Image (cartoon, grey):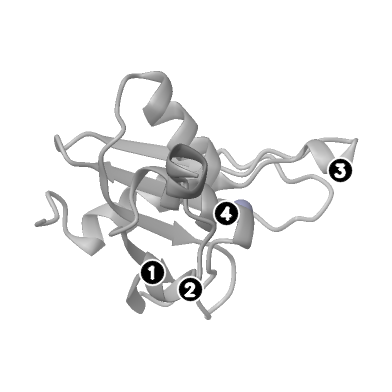
Amino acid sequence: MSMPYSPEELLRVARAAREYAYAPYSGFRVGAALACADGTVYGGCNVENASFGLSICAERVAVFRAVAEGRRSFVALAVVGPGPGPVYPCGACRQVLHEFAPDLTVVVAGDRGEYWERKLEDLLPLVFDPKVIREG
Ligand SMILES: [Zn+2]
């Protein structure tokens, strides 16, 4: 499936979303952008909480925004964090992404304009597959 948005365009949306990150405890501000098969793009930022366990990652914010507006088919996700190196989605976000888009392309970037593209299946081998529940 082709990407309706270029990695650079997705990263631009992710960087814009990062501006809204609420990370007063860690200071680790992350932005994400999720490209849907219909061309829609949803941004997300991490949202922390004084009860730390309630905090949520930028990637899941983007996914849940998209699902709440009727999208379930995704083609690419971009993630940007602080620093020169790439910030990869955490394990929980990888599992949530797999639920809807096992073939997803994940674009990770640092703050120097470099980016790297990975396939979700390479980031999450031997995944807990929803088919296990559906098909027993
Ligand atoms: Zn995460």
The answer to whether mark 1 and mark 2 are in CB contact below 8 A is yes
The amino acid at mark 4 is: Val
- Mark 2 lies on residue: 125
Instruction: Identify the mark at residue 30; answer none if there is no mark.
Output: 4
* Residue 25 image position (x, y, % from top left): 84, 49
User: Is residue 128 or residue 67 the one in the foreground?
Assistant: 128
* Residue 17 image position (x, y, % from top left): 46, 42
Indicate the secondary structure of the residue bearing disc 2.
loop
The answer to whether mark 1 and mark 3 are in CB contact below 8 A is no
Can you tell which of label 4 and label 1 is closer to the viewer? Answer: 1
Q: Is mark 3 within 8 Å of ligand 1?
A: no
Gap in Å between the C-alphas at discs 2 and 3? 28 Å
- Mark 3 lies on residue: 52
The amino acid at mark 3 is: Phe
Residue in view at x 45 percent, y 38 percent: 134
Q: Is residue 64 above or below residue 3?
A: above
Gap in Å between the C-alphas at discs 1 and 3? 29 Å
User: Is residue 15 or residue 40 the one in the foreground?
Assistant: 40
Instruction: Identify the mark at residue 10; answer none if there is no mark.
Output: none
Can you tell which of label 3 and label 4 is closer to the viewer? Answer: 3
User: Is residue 114 or residue 71 the one in the foreground?
Assistant: 71
- Mark 1 lies on residue: 121
